Amino acid sequence: MNKRAKIQFWFEFSTDLICLVFASLISYLFFRNVVVKIFYYPVSEWTRYFAALFAAFAVTAGGFYSKIDIHKRNRWTELTSVIKNGILTYLVFSAFILLIKSPIIESRYMLFSSLILFIGFSTVARYILKRYLTRQFTKSRIASLVGVITTSDIAEDFVKGIDDDWSMRVSGIVLLDDFCENGVFSFHSKLTEENSSSPSSSSSVKTAASLKREICDIPVISTDENFMDWFRSAPLDEVFINVNYQNAMEVHPIVEELEDMGITVHLNIPSLEEMLDESKFNNINCKTYAGYPMATFSAASTYDSKWLIVKRMFDIVLSVIGCILSAPIIAITAIPLLRESKGPLFFKQLRVGKNGRLFYIYKLRSMYEDAEERKAELMEENKMDGLMFKMDDDPRVTKVGRFIRKYSIDELPQFFNVLKGDMSIIGTRPPTVEEFEHYESRHKRRLSMRPGISGMWQVSGRSDIQNFEEVVELDCKYIDEWSPMLDIKIFFKTIVVVLTHKGAE
């Protein structure tokens, strides 16, 4: 399944499961307390009953879900699908409770009433879900941020086609008409040289401002050879390239640099377009976007969606526990921290998250209020080789600040960042905006996964690592080798590091 299909499946699965829980709960309460038709059964029997029900639901949802885009389903199709799923779920459920010989099957009132309520709740919930996904999802933080490289003659139709996928939001368009001669793409720029230089976000802004042009209400970012500056600085998950070319090497520099950034690249295949136009049956077995067959390149691994959901659930559970346990610690720490120096209790700083998204990271303030202003005069004492800033005995850190840094107490408010979805418990290190502005293309790949409170860098020495390239290497290694088991290993290593204060400053 592509990303849209995965999102749709898990949203529908969660919605229907909630409806099933409410339908069963209301039926039980009504026939147990209002119209007494249900006899007393021990907790063990109810456990078996609901385990069988949820197993039946999982089997039906996994084996008979509708693959049709929710945007294209009409009301009759949706109602038919809900009724079919409801009946199938309860038929499988009936078979399960017969097999386990559950005595609760005798309570037919609850069985039939919960089925009717399930179908009713699910019908209403699916209608609400469809409106949300097709109208609001593109504005959410889960939607894929997309950039488009194309030409003026096909730009409008192509962008409209991509916009039909409600899981994507097109952020900007690059038009390369000037590099297309006689219908053949011929791009000869200094991409290799530019790759070793710093991105200039200001030049991208000026280019976009000077164009003053939009296609389908989406800004045209650039029409010249400086377009890669925007890709280096903008928050993007995917890029679509749809231009005329005869030789793959003509677009190779662009694809290669975008891959280095950790961005997924979709590239049109002109030869397949001709075959598709000339095909008698107009049926081709490859992924098409907006009617164009495309090959997909990705430097980052393709992760199983179910494990990503497990990772997010792990984050939510631990962040809720973390917020509860942190509250009294923060309250106790606040007294000496606020008495020692003026300033707020919490420090808020703009950081760069997944694929360039900006968010505010929260920490307990461990420095004096004028710390950011004094940073420039201390740059000569920076012990890090690269873009990060670290120094021994930083005079900007307060006495209480040194203590809470040593025991990682200053990091506790970041559980709120995890709960919001900006960060993960385990991930990569989120850079400051100042660091990010000096990134080379290859550095951006370390942002292709959600940043974390802890990660490979934190459990590999933290302050003992003084080379920025080593930090990038560790973060990219985490991205390439990620698995739930790796997160668990880093989690327990983090506990050891915090207790032993290894690498802390």
Image (cartoon, helix red, strand yellow):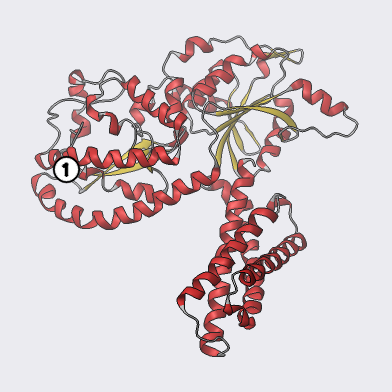
Tell me the residue at 30%/42% (across/down).
Answer: 492
Judge whether 239 appears above or below 1 on screen: above
Name the residue: 22% across, 32% down.
372
> Residue 24's quadrant in the figure?
bottom right
Of residues 242 and 95, the one nearer the viewer is 95
Q: Nearer the viewer, residue 95 or 490?
A: 95
| Residue 148 location, quadrant | top right
Tell me residue 295's x, y (percent). 67, 26
Eyeballing the image, is 375 above or below 249?
Answer: below
Q: From the image, tell me which residue sits under label 1.
A: 404
The reply to whether residue 43 is visible in this rendering is yes
Estimate the x, y position of residue 483 in percent, counting from the top left. Answer: 45, 38
The N terminus sits in image quarter: top right
Q: Quadrant of residue 221?
A: top right
Q: Is 270 located above or below residue 450 in the figure?
A: above
Quarter of the rendering occupied by the C terminus: top left
| Residue with the most extreme right position | 280
Task: Using the image, determine if residue 446 lies above or below residue 95.
Answer: above
Q: Nearer the viewer, residue 21 or 263?
A: 21
Instruction: State the image coordinates of residue 261 (x, y, percent, origin top left).
Output: 49, 25
- Say left or right for 403 vs 416: left
Percent x, y of residue 176: 64, 20
Camera-nearest residue between 353 and 197 = 353
Q: How would you rate the neighbour count of disc 1 (Cα within 10 Å): few for under 14, some for 14-19, many for 20 or more?
A: many
Q: How many marks?
A: 1
- Amino acid residing under circle 1: Ile
Residue at image point 62% right, 63% down: 56
Q: Is residue 405 visible?
A: no
